[in-house]
Image (cartoon, rainbow, N blue to C red):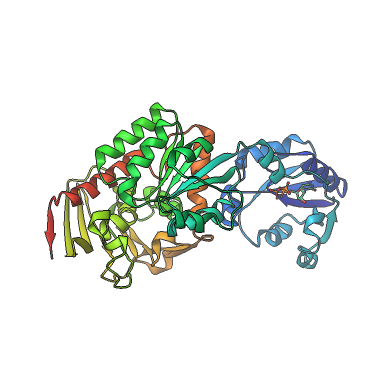
Amino acid sequence: MKKVITYGTFDLLHQGHINLLRRAKALGDYLIVGVTSDSFDKNRGKLNVRNNVLERVEAVKSTGFVDEVIIEDYVGQKIDDIQKYDVDIFAIGSDWEGLFDYLREYCEVVYLPRTEGISSTMLREETQDEVKFGVVGCGRVARRFIPESSFVSGVKVVAAFDTDADTLKNYVVTKKDIKPCLSFDALLKEVDAVYVATPHLSHYDYIKQSLLAGKHVLCETPMVLRGERAKELFELAENRNVVLMEANKTAHCPAFNHLMVMVKSGVIGQVVDINASLSKLWDDDLTLREFNPEQAGGSLYELGSYPLLPIIKLMGVHYDDLILFSRMKGGVDMYTKGLVRYPSAVCSFQVGLGVKTEGNLVISGTKGYAYVPAPWWKTDYFELRYENQNENKKFFYQWDGDGLRYEIQEFIRCVIGHRFSTARLRRRESICMAEIMQRFTERQNLYEI
Ligand code: CTP
């Protein structure tokens, strides 16, 4: 019996796939198809796949050409599979011409003619509603948004607004498709969604105006600095049937996400301690917004939502006690350490604009601990460590570009799927962070050092 194997994502199964499978089957007697797993696709940067692995497997089976479906989950698996299944022919579309010649050592390699004029990418683009984005606040942060959004299908930045005319001009100077708007109201008329990247204190008004105009909102973190404001805005979003999401990029980081679900499923036992630290030293330019108390500068507002994330995600929003220790200068905290006590755990975090810290994340449990080296907030790597070092495991992931593409993609998924909340950053978690910011503002349980 002649065995043939082929591989693919087979998203939105189309005629090109069907032709390919028919031709592959005709090469032998038994056809094995390797369908990529969801995580494998994500790890190799294929973020837009529409059908999940079960749907794709079913679609491949329904063609009637396939004798066996397997899941492709890691780089190098093809060699293993060819040997394991005693394969005679590896077949793949001609768009891969030459790229799989290295398999000739193991079996015959055949490049089959690709069907012209159709692909999953094309179908995804044709069938996806395009979400038109407007950017408000065209500074440093917003500059990353445009290149990052180009990696997500269904997104188009069409308008921008900034209170500073020069900043706005510079932002759009090389981007012909983006309309510079003279007012925020004018921007709202052009768009379906708003990306808010203005200084913290203006977030609330921009978000509220956008939601009232029926626009979806992705707002830079920290979204707002008062718990009740966060609550109010999420309620307003739900009433207006639009999505409001805090743009915390770590929450959408593939490695971080996997770490969270692993820890939640008990791989290090019961979590008893979390320490998360993040510092970013700036030049001693005290005129920067980051050091300006009038503009909510300081370490906690600026950086706090990142280390609070693993604590709140793993231990929940109902802590017993929170103590803050801050070193103040010129009305802002150059460094803040927080201790968060839960019924069966104690967590701590450090943030610094004027103090350098180690910058790692350590989650300690009754069976082992997770160690994520700096910069853990945009990590592509972590370790699980145990008493018996032979059990230690290292995990590696993809982290592309500035990483904003992951949050933009999830935002678009929520907009298209009419989901108000994402498991990656629940509304109650965003509210809890805003409440903690508020405690700091009100100097509750805060000690200066
Ligand atoms: N294929 C083909 N003709 C097409 C599209 C795909 O023969 N028009 C083949 C590919 O060469 C590959 C298999 O189908 O052997 C699975 O390809 P896959 O990457 O899943 O499909 P694409 O449509 O190319 O997907 P994408 O646009 O996401 O890259």
Foreground residue, 184 or 94? 184
Evaluate whether residue 269 shows in this view.
no
Foreground residue, 318 or 251? 251
Horizontal side of residue 21 vs 423, given as left or right:
right
Residue 275 locus on image (x, y percent) = 28, 60
Residue 422 locus on image (x, y percent) = 43, 40
Write down the quadrant of residue 237 in the picture.
top left
Of the 4 image quadrants, the one containing the C terminus is: bottom left
User: Looking at the image, which residue is at 50% across and 59% down?
Assistant: 170
Residue 245, placed above or below residue 360: above
Horizontal side of residue 46 vs 190, given as left or right:
right
User: Looking at the image, which residue is at 86% across and 51% down?
Assistant: 113
Residue 156 locus on image (x, y percent) = 58, 45
Residue 203 locus on image (x, y percent) = 35, 45
Write down the quadrant of residue 158 in the picture.
top right
Horizontal side of residue 299 vs 411, given as left or right:
left
Residue 30, placed above or below residue 383: above
**Tag count:** 0
User: Looking at the image, which residue is at 69% across and 46% down?
Assistant: 121
Foreground residue, 222 or 174? 174
Foreground residue, 67 or 168? 168
Horizontal side of residue 208 vs 115, given as left or right:
left
Evaluate whether residue 135 shows in this view.
yes
Residue 45, placed above or below residue 122: below
